[in-house]
Amino acid sequence: MTTTSSTTTATSTSTVIGRPAARGIAIVPLRLFLGLTFVDAGLGKLLSAAYLGHGPQGFAAQARGFAHGSPINALVRAVAVAHPTPTGLLLAVVELAIGVFTLAGLASRTAAAGGLALSLTFFLTASWHTRPFFYGPDLPFAAGWLVLLLAGAAGLPSLDRRLARRQRAIAGLGDDREVALPLDRVQHLCAAADTHGRCAGATGRTCRGQYCPLLPQEPGPVAVDAGRRALLARGALAGVVLVGTGVVGAAIAAAERLLGSDSATPGGLASLPSQPSQPPARQVTPSHRRPSGTRIGSLSDIPVGQAAAFTSKSGRPAVAVRLGQRRVVAYSAVCTHAGCTVGYDSGSRLLACPCHGAEFDPARGAAPVAGPTSTPLPSITLHLGSDGGLYLSPSS
């Protein structure tokens, strides 16, 4: 039982003995927000066929973009980039499980620790290039999860609390919830309980907790055993829920990839066969004679309405988009927001950034149409030769 402090004088000035009673209701909005957000994030990934695909909105493209410039670049490349499908599926399932655990109050601190770890990972990858740093969403999420990690269930209705009460009831123990009492009530109870006059708080002196019958005592062996059993029951239930979430999540992802209307492959970029040696310039110009410059591929390599990737002289990624029979445009594939590599979504006919949702319209000079940037992608000049080849301009 937690009590508030006694006064040092007859005034209302007080000091605290023990821990102040937690006002758990204050963290209800945070618990609901974080739990629902992570459930939505996990389900959103599992219900999107494109997420586990190879297009610009897929996890594989996101991982490559997140690795660029990240302080944990090596780890991201070794795990997420090297094994995108299992890593992406695991991420979605873990997000969903953390959200479910948080809403149900099951393994509360473990779920909060997982949410904190994921949020910090997202900060070091997805939000790392966001400036100023407080514009990114992941640090506030991390702060919220830290609050839940410190508070635990905070006396709120939860499966953790229910399991603990059940085990204490089986052991013949009473409820061990902490409650708050007014100071004058504590003094009255102390005076009534202490017949030897040892309670300083009852006489208005500074109370340091000695001899206080209201403060929590060291748990006996029965209470320790009940706590151990509650911990095992909580762990077993959490394991069942986690495995069940994984199985259901994998089934949802598989069904969505088989039946979803947005296939897993749209927007995948084929690579043009040769490497360019010229820096980015501007656009495509038809030519009746073989143009000078570096050939990067053939017009026939790119179906109408599709795109192909190539590499600029500086080693930066670039993309060529075929808008019509004789119309091809080319742009830098480096997003002007945070430097991630964009991909082409043939469904929307837009160049999309997997990191923060920026979208560019290649038919309108790669002007941004969505997302956090207002700067278009730099254009690259290509020449279309009479032989059907695509050439980088030597003067660009």
Image (cartoon, grey):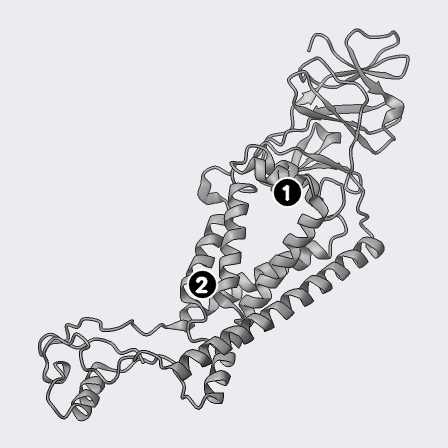
Circle 2: residue type: Leu
How far apart, in angstroms, are the residues tagged by discs 2 and 1?
28 Å
User: Measured along the vertical axis of the image, is residue 301 above or below residue 392?
Assistant: below
Residue drawn at (52%, 71%) of the image: 105
User: Measured along the vertical axis of the image, is residue 250 above or below residue 389?
Assistant: below
Residue drawn at (63%, 65%) of the image: 242
Residue 180 pos. (x, y %): 30, 80
Tag on residue 269?
none
Residue drawn at (44%, 91%) of the image: 172
Residue that badge 1 annotates: 79
Residue 57 pos. (x, y %): 71, 43
Tag on residue 148?
2
Circle 1: residue type: Val
Residue 78 is left or right of residue 130, and the answer is: right
User: Measured along the vertical axis of the image, is residue 5 above or below residue 51?
Assistant: below
Q: Which residue reaches farthest front? A: 221
Tell me the quadrant of the picture where the N terminus can be found.
bottom left
User: Measured along the vertical axis of the image, is residue 197 above or below residue 156?
Assistant: below
2 vs 1, front mark: 1
Quick check: can you spot residue 354? no
Helix, strand or loop at label 1? It is helix
Residue 179 occupies which quadrant of the picture? Answer: bottom left
Residue 143 occupies which quadrant of the picture? Answer: bottom left
Helix, strand or loop at label 2? It is helix
2 or 1: tag closer to the N-terminus: 1
In this view of the protein, which residue sits in the foreground, 133 or 145? 145
Residue 200 occupies which quadrant of the picture? Answer: bottom left
Tell me the quadrant of the picture where the C terminus can be found.
top right
Quick check: can you spot residue 332? yes
